[in-house]
Image (cartoon, coloured by chain):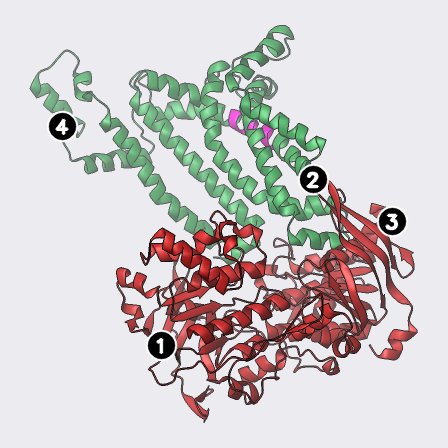
Chain colours: A green, B red
Amino acid sequence: MTTLLARRLLLAVPTLLIISMFVFLLQKLLPGDPVLVMAGEDRDPAVLELLRAKYHLNDPLPLQYLAWLVNALHGDLGISLRTNQPVLALIVEKLPVTLQLAIMAMTFALLIGIPLGVLAAVKRNTLIDYIVSLIALAGLSVPNFWLGIMLILVVSVKLGWLPASGYQPFSVDPLISLKTMLMPAFVLGNALAASIMRHTRSAMIGVLSSDYIRTARAKGLTEREVVLSHAFRNALVPIITLGALLFGELLAGAVLTEQIFTIPGFGKLIVDAVFNRDYAVVQGVVLCTAVGFISLNLLADVMAVLLNPRLRASL
Amino acid sequence: MTQTVANANAPVLRVEGLTTSFRIDGRWTPVVRDLSFEVRAGETMAIVGESGSGKSVTSLSIMRLLAARSSRIEGSVQLAGRELTTLSDKEMVSVRGRDIGMIFQEPMTSLNPIFTVGRQISESLVRHRNLSQREARAETLRLLDRVRIPDAQSRIDAYPHQFSGGMRQRVMIAMALASKPKLLIADEPTTALDVTIQGQILDLIKDLQAEETMGVLFITHDMGVVAEIADRTLVMRRGVAVEQGETAEIFHHARHPYTRALLAALPRLGEMRGTSGPRPLPIIDPDTGVAMPSGSVSETVDKSQSPILAVRDLVTRFPVFGGIFGQQVGTVHAVEGVSFELAQGETLALVGESGCGKSTTGRSVARLIQPTSGFVGLDGYDVLRLKPLDLRRLRRSVQMIFQDPFSSLNPRMTVGASVAEPITTHKLAGSREARDKAADLLERVGLHASMMNRYPHEFSGGQRQRIAIARALALDPKVIIADESVSALDVSIKAQVCNLLMELQESLKIAFLFISHDMAIVERISHRVAVMYLGEIVEIGPRDAVFSNPQHPYTQRLLAAVPVADPARRGIRRDGGERELTSPIRPLDYVPPKRTYRTVGDRHFVQNEG
């Protein structure tokens, strides 16, 4: 177990390094000279040269990268050009918002997708299976923004049950916080639920036709025991891996969802940063997302190993 | 077990007029028709038949384990007088595992990989015998001891993948017997196992049956196994029982032509004693009972020339990776110091059990995998030192036929294109000529040229193997490596394909490297035999010498383990050891010992132990 963890952590290091290089180069590849921007109207070559020296812009690229990396590792991701706030502070402020949205959306997706997937697999090729599959298809096909707008229209405007937009930190008022996040999380989780349902269904169908399920039945276990204890745990491994991969999709979806419901989260931060050419912020957000994505997949790997003793053996 | 016990007891299982139908394309098609038989307490009843005969469907019908929506069971199945076909699903659940225990063919996949074996056995105990978790664990330990799993105390919390195939089958047996069932259904329980392990499992089933006086319904395709285990035998073909009776009666006085055909096609170990060359198997038409002329083959071995294939000190090793950095932590010594020669027109059999390196040897010789060191001389090529371009030319001299006829043909290519492909890729002929040659080849292997435009799925397993042989012949190779090429085929088909190989050898003077675990077939088909164990040849010599005068203990063990199709030997027990094949994985610093061989007879060599 510790060997596996150590091995995966070691593998994550080069991945992160490569990502950080890309993020760093992103800034260098962009047109325009930052010194010109900083100098403003004053185009005196001496001043420009001074600025270049000050910001080490004359150093070879690898050295610049190293300096940037060391700073990033110390939590210094630079200063936002627009707000003049440290990028790290911006991230720390917005991250919890998106994290809450993502966790709630994932919870929705798992709570809807897994039971429906299991049900469809058990009732394979019956009316129930077809209905569930139809719902899943609808969930995948309906665009997020349309569903979001419709929900706002019906639930908020007509019925007035839930607020249409805004954000309240969980720590300030949990109830209101959950209420405002409910609709966005549902919208965001909806497409994921459909994916998870389809995958759960096919994983369960595969497992249910395996020899050891026949053994479990021959042993005289009830269908309930067979499905929930013998089959489901085997089907869970691919679902967990999928869940971690879908997290990336979740973040992409969050950008749009946060726009619709005007939630001041990560997605909004990066969209604003891109439009304003606030590169330091873009870099910080991308780096931070990548770290989150890699950690989550690491966690999924560990869980897969916990669930599957065969993987433990291959260490 | 004895005849008196069997007669004194009422039937445990009585099946009457069992008809099982599957819904195929909306129509109910019977796959088992009007089957009737009985199994008495303490008795073993064998159902024997080839693939598609309905024998497994019968066992699943008794257990009612077939999917309810696509299958239909008619007739009567009574367990100790209780009708099973009319029970509710809920009642049936408590019959399964409690009154009827079942073991399956595939020990590797029949246990749930994520639960410990202890949990899987005690689950049954908790369910059927209302034991507490603690009692169930104690009982599980006892069961593991009874199925002779060494060191049960430490193995109870192990997962299935930590057990070998034979040990997993023991776990399955422990599980099936947990609640002392009246009937044990064993569906091909030893088919996937190595022959020495098969012997152990058969012994175990016999012992346990004697202790429990339960009825055993034993399903198999192997007449040798039937002879060894069954009191009575039922022969099935295409869903119908063609014959049933006392096993000895069936073997000695079979009435139905199909039974006779099955028995005739079965090679019997030892019947070739005193002869030197191969001999075709007798073939009997299963419908009419008419014997087809099998004849003999003339001498094909050309000893005057230098051997077509010479292998010296062949070594093939694979690294094993592990640890934090995925570094090499060990080495699989798959082939270690193997040397042999093969003359034109000769068949050398490489025999041994799974993991002994026989397939790796074959692939190394054809350089489908890269050997570590050694020398392979084939038709004038120094095989291990060939450049890529010459390697392609080598393929004209050596071809392979694999085990699985289903996956070794491209399903999207017509069989004509499959057979012609090697000719055109090697630019030996234009596409028209290649097609003509492919047609000839198909005729040659006993198919019709008109089948050229069909796809592999339209052929049976035996026909597909013939197509694979035709493809191998397309380049007029000098050597064909046949890797378990007949193992997956039914007995009668196996006999036909073996006869075809002998016939081709006679007419084309091909040399075969015949890789097989089936000793009886090897005895029929080969001139010489090499026995492999843990990557090394432990004994090699003329076929008759190795079979009638085996010197190495492993060869002796291997031959003793082969089930003999003679009901008179039913009482026999083997050495009864729980011996397992050890692994060829060694630590990095392992240096293989220098092996020496002693001469037993003419060209018969045995590895010295130590």
Estimate how packed mark 4 is, as few (under 14), some (14 to 19) or many (20 or more) residues with alpha carbons within 10 Å. few
How far, Cα to Cα, is label 4 from label 1? 77 Å
Q: Residue at x 64, y 66 (%)?
A: B191
Q: Which residue is mark 1?
A: B308
Q: Which mark is residue B87?
A: 3
Secondary structure, mark 1, is loop
Residue B157 on image: x %, y %: 64, 61
Looking at the image, residue B323 lies above or below residue A43: below
Q: CA distance from mark 4 to mark 3?
A: 90 Å
Instruction: Give the dominant element type of the magenta stretch: helix, strand or loop.
Output: helix
Q: CA distance from mark 1 to mark 2?
A: 59 Å
Q: Are marks 1 and 3 in contact (CB under 8 Å)?
A: no
**Dot 3: element:** loop
Q: Quadrant of residue B128?
A: bottom right
Q: Nearer the viewer, mark 1 or mark 2?
A: 1
Asked whether the beta carbons under mark 4 and mark 3 sit within 8 Å of each other, the answer is no
Q: Are marks 1 and 2 in contact (CB under 8 Å)?
A: no
Q: Nearer the viewer, residue A253 or B28?
A: B28
Residue extent of the magenta highlight: A101-110
Numbered circle sitting on residue A122: 2
